[in-house]
Amino acid sequence: MIDPHEQPEQPEIFIEEDHPPFWTPWRIVYAIIAIIIIIAFLTMVLWPAILAFGEPPPPPPPTEPLPRV
């Protein structure tokens, strides 16, 4: 007869103890390159906007007075 209080057999879970590290030298190089590209893109896009909104607009060019009719 089956005992209702008996624990069912748990399958063994294979845990790999020897996994390679996440930050390998090539991943570090790729991360540095990605950060440089992101900074360059943000600088290229945002720097002109910061400069444009940070300064007052230039004065309009002088115009010649219209002749009287």
Image (cartoon, rainbow, N blue to C red):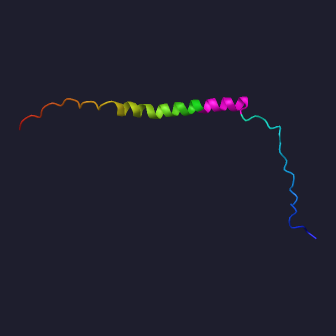
Q: Viewer-proximal residue, 38 or 64?
A: 38
Tell me residue 34's x, y (percent): 61, 33
Magenta-drawn segment: 23-34
Q: Which quadrant holds the C terminus?
A: top left
Tell me residue 38's x, y (percent): 55, 34
Query: Residue sitting at 62 percent across and 30 percent down?
Result: 33
Q: Residue furthest bottom?
A: 1
Relative placement, left or right, of 66 versus 16 is left
Res 21 quadrant in image: top right
Q: Residue furthest front?
A: 5
Query: Residue sitting at 44 percent across and 31 percent down?
Result: 47
Q: Which quadrant holds the N terminus?
A: bottom right
Tell me residue 49's x, y (percent): 40, 34
Q: Viewer-proximal residue, 66 or 49?
A: 49
Q: How many marks?
A: 0
Confirm whether the magenta stretch covers residue 43. Answer: no
Q: Residue furthest right?
A: 1
Query: Residue sitting at 73 percent across and 31 percent down?
Result: 24
Q: Residue furthest left?
A: 69
Main SS class of the magenta portion in the image: helix
| Placement of 48 over or under 2, stated as above or below | above
Relative placement, left or right, of 12 versus 50 is right
Query: Residue sitting at 62 percent across and 29 percent down?
Result: 32
Tell me residue 22's x, y (percent): 73, 35
Q: Viewer-proximal residue, 2 or 55?
A: 2
Relative placement, left or right, of 18 versus 50 is right
Res 68 quadrant in image: top left
Res 62 quadrant in image: top left
